[in-house]
Image (cartoon, grey):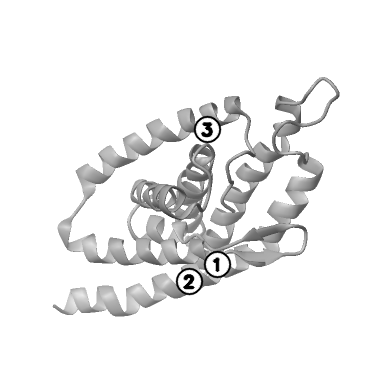
Amino acid sequence: MHVPDGYLSPATAIVSYAAAAPALAYGLKKVKEDFQEENLALLSTVTALSFMAMMLNIPIPGGTSGHAIGTAVIAILFNPYFAAVAIGLVLIIQALLFGDGGVTALGLNIFAMGITASFVGYYAYHLTKKFLNEKIALFFSGWLSIVCASVVIAVVLGIQPLIASDPSGKPLYFPFDLKVTIPAIVFSHMVYFGVAEGIYTLLVISFVNKYYFKNENSA
């Protein structure tokens, strides 16, 4: 799902940075206020899991690829501010050290996979667990978080031909419009990667609740 360099117009890159940067700055402020040292090991572990999950890009029909992101797990275990900052850090490291996702597209990637997925996953879980089975609520929150992230990326990429084209109408950056990006990106995440994200969210949080918090409570 990482958007590479060369896909976004300069105006889009600037706007996405302008949207992501203050949100991350505020999230970091909230993390400093709420951070508890005893949770460092758990936070580090689930962040590392997200890092590994996002490095496993799986190609699918339609000329695209995707992966799990693990954002909902961090948001549910901690809060969406922790998740946004943790995933933002993961995306920065991946872009700068591994070339996974472009530097010019970093603002968009953080806004979609870090900020959007964090708050969607967190609130989806806390709203649905009131009337759904706990396991279904966990699965749904993971599924919805990555699907909403894919919608953000699909829309931003799909409007690039409208934003920047040459006098003949040829797109200067990403060449495909919304009629292509919505089915290729969003549909694949609804059917494939959303299911994987839902299962990932369910399994990781169930494991943490069963073993980590159980041991914490008995200590």
- How many numbered circles does the render carry? 3
Task: Tell me the residue at 40%/67% (across/down).
Answer: 49
On the image, which quarter does residue 172 sit in?
Answer: top right
Q: For mark 3, does the 10 Å Cα neighbourhood hold few (<14), some (14 to 19), or many (20 or more) residues?
A: many
Q: Rounded to the nearest whole Å, what is the CA distance between mark 1 and mark 3? A: 27 Å
Question: Is 199 on the left or on the right of 81, as rendered?
Answer: right
On the image, which quarter does residue 175 sit in?
Answer: top right
**Mark before the other along the chain sequence, 2 or 3:** 3
**Mark before the other along the chain sequence, 1 or 3:** 3
Question: Is 155 on the left or on the right of 96, as rendered?
Answer: right
Above or below for 19 versus 119: above
Disc 2 target residue:
202
Above or below for 149 versus 194: above
Q: Amino acid type of disc 2?
A: Leu
Residue 96 image label: none
The quarter of the rendered structure image containing the C terminus is bottom left
Q: Are marks 1 and 2 in contact (CB under 8 Å)?
A: yes
Task: Tell me the residue at 27%/75% (across/down).
Answer: 212
Q: For mark 1, does the 10 Å Cα neighbourhood hold few (<14), some (14 to 19), or many (20 or more) residues?
A: many
Residue 198 image label: 1
Q: Rounded to the nearest whole Å, what is the CA distance between mark 1 and mark 2? A: 6 Å
Extreme residue in the right direction = 168
Extreme residue in the top direction = 167
Extreme residue in the left direction = 219
Question: Is 84 on the left or on the right of 5, as rendered?
Answer: left
Relative depth, front residue between 28 and 145: 28
Disc 3 target residue:
16
The reply to whether residue 71 is visible in this rendering is yes
